[in-house]
Image (cartoon, coloured by chain):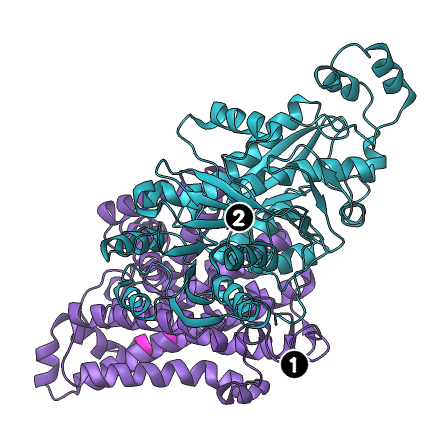
Chain colours: A cyan, B purple
Amino acid sequence: MSDEPNKGLFSPLRRKLLMGMAAVPAITMLPRASFAQAPATSAVNTTGLAVTDTEVTVGILHSATGTMAISETGSIEAEKLAIEQINAMGGVLGRKIKFIQEDGASDWPTFAEKAKKLLVNDKVAAIMGCWTSASRKAVLPVMEQYNGMLYYPTFYEGLEQSKNVIYTGQEATQQILAGLNWIAKEKGAKSFFFIGSDYIWPRTSNKIARKHVENVLKGKVVGEEYYPLGNTQFNSVINKIKLTKPDVIFTDVVGGSNVAFYKQLKAAGIDLSKQALLTISVTEDEIDGIGGENIAGAYACMKYFQSLDNPNNKAFVPAFKKMWGEKTVIGDVTQAAYLGPWLWKLTVEKAGSFDVDKIAAASPGVEFKGAPEGYVRIHENHHLWSKTRVGRAKLDGQFELIYETADLVEPDPFPKGYQ
Amino acid sequence: MINSRFFNRSELMGFIALAAVLFVILPLTLDVFRLNLVAKYLTYAFVALGLVLCWGYGGILSLGQGVFFGLGGYCMAMFLKLEASSVENTKIQSTPGIPDFMDWNQITSLPLFWQPFHSLTFTILAIILVPGVFALIIGTAMFKRRVGGTYFAIITQAVAAILTILIVGQQGYTGGINGMTDLRTLKGWDIRPDHAKVILYFVEVVLLFACIGIAQFIRLTKLGRILVAMREQEDRVRFSGYSVANFKIFAFCMAAVFAAIGGAMFALNVGFMSPSFVGIVPSIEMVIYTAVGGRMSIFGAIWGALLVNFAKTSLSESFPQLWLFGLGALFIAVVLAFPNGLSGLWADYVQPRIDRLFASRKPKRDWKDNSVADGAPAE
């Protein structure tokens, strides 16, 4: 995937080896070259992490069981793929990555318990994990207390920043604002109806969206409704939509509720090719359950779609399918999870050390050119610079890319004027 | 007839064994991380203890103990959260000085019902009284109308579901599905470092033994006998002139208070509280701990809570994808093979051998009339 130069490694021997092999594609030779002269463990690991001369241990902490398993499985798969690819290229600082997988069981305290176990018992060098905001909130104090490093893949509500977390997904403004701008311009939209699941992420996202609609786009929010997680009855809100006739339905309904919501929309005769609907919560994974025919025509605001047409993604999708089966689909979060191990590897090599403090300090400015979504870079605030993209759902469950921002969007977890 | 001694011999052995394990063996052999996990398991032992009184002796099956565990836990968490939300800790918020989740939900001042939780004394009272009074209300409403058995179990489940929905829905006031996280200090004393975890562990074990003492006391008094009698022949007790409802309410309230103490210790030991301990599933899990350990036995239920949770942790560490099936199989096996749980197993197979051992040395005395786990009606 990535043929990034290993900046952290600059021993003369390797340079000679590489020069001698100038004709050979670097990527095939890197493994041997870096294994040959890994820096001494005592030098790269001064805080007693699980790093040996040949191995480094990381943790994978997601829900393999429980209601969230369906969403988090993609992340587990992506992280394992990234680790395998990194190992095939020679590992990190000459060490193979070994992983310990723990099950958060869709239960927030279990996440905290397992995170602590990974840090205290197993001394892992980094944890790739968490999915819901609730699990991250439970794990965060543990990461800060025991000074761990968490790579968190999900797009989330922002309002958070930690030395011990790298947020590889988008925070709310990165996900929402460009999409709203686009739909306001493209569809001339003035009135918006918000529907969300009732927890922190939709509430915060809608708060930001409302401020943007009212203050920047000079539009109107004609309705804002929340439903408990797992709700399957959306008839009343669909009637309200029919009455208020908004230009855009803006949704952040999550998980299984989506299936009911889109089916009931369709049954109520709302045609998504005529009624604009912008969702920030439906990826390819969700469409798998909703069914392409129920959601075709809806717009989704993400940073990654499986259908992206770039060389990185064209290598990533087949590699993912080869490892996990032809039928798997890859959503936004899965891709963001794939970035975790890579960003960690690049940061370790930049820092020349596995020490968490050094990684935290070295993270800003780390760039990953091999990301399936295209070039990304870590910001001072430990979030990623990334593009915002709008895709239109097709019958086959894939998205067709309609719009993407020209430049990378700056992450802004504490947006001024949107609080 | 009330035994003149507080514990008979087998109970005394159970007491000594549990005390030895909790006070000496575990703290000496486990590192702080594992000891803290044991502290977490023990919070469920409080619930199990309450269930022994209410379900094992009183015959009242409550599938809503999570409600009381949660109420106790939330009371504690509210106090801790307020302390963690000092103005300087929350500078980045639009309204500094209120818990972070309120700020995210556009609440700009501390709600009225949160105000008293600035006081630790009030909080400790609330941990006991809020669940106690709540149980009193439910108990009075149900038992005075002679609603019992399955119907009562269903209603406690409904209460658990309602409270979960309430907590999740009112997230500006309760933290919603995230719960209350990042609890830091108790009256300025940091509850997160290792030495604090060890101290909290011992505080919890002492509290547990205090609760065991109370439960044992209740069991030995006439009250305990009436509870057992009620379980076996409710009408006969009623016709004897006892107010069955009041005894049931009492047992239910005691179980609620024990569960609440467990919940409060949970918030202290684990450092957060969330609605995932309040709902139907955790409530049923709590009944399972008790069933596995043995619902007739105070010590059995505590071992049940410890062992089931230990199995949960170790199975999920070894088999992250399959552990739930393993755990399910374990429950089915235990309940099918030993209806009285592990303590039944002990009483049927191990205890007789020990008795024989003693009997061969000492002149024979009859201990059987007061054995722990036989579930026989009062003599």
Q: Main secondary structure of the magenta part?
A: helix
Where on the picture, by quarter, is residue A349?
top right
Q: Residue at x 45, y 76 (%)?
A: B72
In the foreground, B7 or A313: A313
Q: CA distance from mark 1 to mark 2?
A: 35 Å
Camera-nearest label, 1 or 2: 2
- State the image coordinates of residue B306 (x, y, percent, origin top left): 44, 56
Outermost residue toward the right in this view: A12
**Residue B187 appears left or right of B221:** right
Q: Residue at x 71, y 52 (%)?
A: A382
Residue B346's place in the image compared with B189, above or below, is above
Foreground residue, B184 or A289? Answer: A289
* Residue B202: image location, x then y, percent: 58, 67
Residue A323 appears in the rendering: yes
Q: Residues within 10 Å of mark 2 (few under 14, many from 20)?
A: many
For residue B246, which numbered disc appears in the image? none
Of the 4 image quadrants, the one containing the C terminus of chain A is bottom right
Kind of residue indicated by mark 1: Gly
Q: Secondary structure at mark 2?
A: strand
Which corner quadrant holds the N terminus of chain A? top right
* Span shown in magenta: B214-219
Q: Which residue is mark 2?
A: A302
What's the amino acid at mark 2?
Answer: Met
Give the numbered dot on residue B97. Answer: 1
Above or below for B182 versus B127 = above
